[in-house]
Image: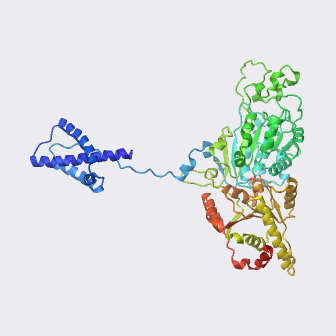
Amino acid sequence: MSEQLKKSKTKAKARYLKAKKDRRKRRKTDTPLPPKLSQNESEDEEEEEDVIVEDKPAPKRKRISPEPDVDAEMQADSDEEVHQRSPTPLATLPSFPLPVLPNAPSKSALALQGLDKALLDAEIIEPSRVVPVDSIGHDRNDGKLPVLSEKTKKRLHELGIAEFFAVQTALLPFLLPSQSRHRAVYCPYDPPRDVCTSAPTGSGKTLAYVIPIVEILSSRIVTRLRALVVLPTRDLVIQVQETFEALSKGRGLKIAVATGQHSFAHEQNQLIADQTTMLQGGSSKVDILICTPGRLIDHLNGTPNFSLQHLRFLVIDEADRLLAQSFQDWLAQVLAATRPPPRLSSLNPKLTHHSTDQESIPHHDALSPSFLHACTTIPDVRTDFDDQTFPSCQKLLFSATLTSDPSKIAAMGLRDAKYFIVHHQEKDGDVDIPAAVTEKFTMPVGLKEHMIVCETSQKPLMLFHLVHAHSVTNALVFTKSAESTTRLLRLFEFFEEARTAGNSNADTSTRRRTVVRTYSSDLSRADRKTILDQFKDQAIDILVCSDLISRGIDISHVSHVVSYDAPVDMRKYVHRVGRTARAGRSGDAWTLVEEQEARHFKQLLSGAGHLEQVKKLRVSEKDLKDLVPFYQVCLS
Ligand SMILES: Nc1ncnc2c1ncn2[C@@H]1O[C@H](COP(=O)(O)OP(=O)(O)OP(=O)(O)O)[C@@H](O)[C@H]1O
């Protein structure tokens, strides 16, 4: 385009110069202007000359080069000559706008490109919003407002929960049923909307889905697998199981876990009532299953009568991490199992071979409404009631760092998704840009963050100084690998030995030896459980751990999180520091940054708009002086 403009401009100038030359000639010979036809002929010549002008050597080209003074002169000359000397006005030369660079798109416009519209219509919830438990669920509007039963409220009070946190204040009204639909565990004609939630670490996301699930499923009559919760690690599965059990106490719901902790046969016996008869509707002993994706796939492929057709809820917690796992294409398999096949016989090929076998004849009430149409044994007679039915499964995605990657979200096949984002209201131009879009994650309100830049060789000493100068107990210290946890533990133990020996005459508090342990994949499952229980009981002061524990683990008394090895990405940072300052408490996060890493770490923070929140903590040689002798002993 600019090439064309340049060419047109060159032509125009060439025409102008030619016209000027002609006018001079005419002035000399006093020849009148040729008639219009001749003008056209003259233009043809100009076309030819145009080519010649382009091909002329440098000096000639210089004359028609697009210099500003030539342009000005051209305009002035043409005005003057047209008005003063020409008997016939000259045709006005067309003017072309100069090419201009468009303005760079704003940051907000860039952030919004290619994003799901649902994400842009997200409901943003102020993190400080809380409402009393009793204020939710009053049925004042002819059965149209959500209902929270008295039993659930009573249980919440027993658990010490008097107020709902921000994420819960938004999700409960959305997920809880109104009185008129209170008992609906199936909604085949009016399926519920799916939900994506991004809320800070420790903000109460677990209860935000546990409460509605317990509330809705408590009204079920027959036990079927109606809620499936998928989490990335066994520890998280156990933690969520405890929350479900605590809240659903006395409601008759059956809850199970599948993590591979027990044998496959044991798990099958826990989950399935009848494994021998082929039952098209499945056969479940449990209402709620909490599992890791690997074990879930094992049961989908290898457990008879394990069916997801009755699911009312599919929860993917720590969704960004799980959606990034392509292991056995687990997500596609799970989603396929929640949808009805075209004919039910294709669900279980064995059924076609045994179609006359009494055992294979399904009990129709055991099929979910959306699977009913595909049943081979029901005559395919069309009636007025043959409206299309949909699976009633509501997908709920949760994370503190929810992905904004449209392809990952698209893989979930969400139905009319509603986004909830707990984030400080922020204006960027005219558009409210949700945190999940801009990867600006929200941190817990009570969290204080610091970075300590130091030489690599000083790092252990710096850690020992921080621990002793601030009398730290109840801390998690993150390293980059399982191997590093073991090495740091060794060093810590040697240091404590040297320090307590060197302080043998000091008071008891100074002489007290800090209890340090490791937690990583190098330990057996049983050892990990023991260590975690001891840490929860505060028998361990400092747990040196790998990132195995950085997500989701809820230990209320963690007062400090130290990143001994700085995290390499922002999501990891958010999840690590989120192990403290949970549920409205305060906490400290310290990151030890080696000098050569400082630039990268700061870029990481500033990319997430978080650099200002992480203050520098300066430690001088003087501060370390007292510990140096012990450190030298420890190194030797
Ligand atoms: N309304 C509430 N009142 C008091 N405590 C609550 C409330 N809701 C949740 N909690 C407590 O807050 C703690 C953190 O909750 P939870 O583990 O659900 O956080 P989370 O948002 O899932 O965090 P993460 O993203 O780190 O997994 C838990 O100990 C939980 O019992």
Instruction: Count the numbered circles shown.
Output: 0
Left/right placement of residue 540 relative to residue 401 reads: right
Q: Can residue 126 be seen in this view?
A: yes
Residue at (55% x, 51% y) in the render: 108
Query: Which quarter is ligand 1 in?
Result: bottom right
Considering only vertical position in the picture, is 571 above or below 335?
Answer: below
Horizontal side, residue 429 vs residue 278: left or right: left
At a point 78% along the width and 73% down the height, the residue shown is 635
**Colouring style:** rainbow
Q: Tell me where residue 615 appears, x and y as whole percent.
A: 65, 67
Quarter occupied by the C terminus:
bottom right
Question: Is 597 or 605 nearer to us in this picture?
Answer: 597
Q: Give x and y (percent) for residue 480.
A: 73, 60
Q: In which quarter of the image is residue 289?
A: top right
Q: Name the residue nearer the viewer: 340 or 604.
A: 604
Give residue 10's position: percent from left, percent from top: 29, 47
282, above or below 517, in the image: above
Reply above or below: 244 against 222. below
User: Which quadrant holds the N terminus?
Assistant: top left
- Percent x, y of residue 17: 22, 49
633 w.r.t. 404: above or below: below
Q: Which of 209 and 133 is in front in this view?
A: 209
The extreme bottom residue here reads 505
Does the image show residue 610?
Answer: no
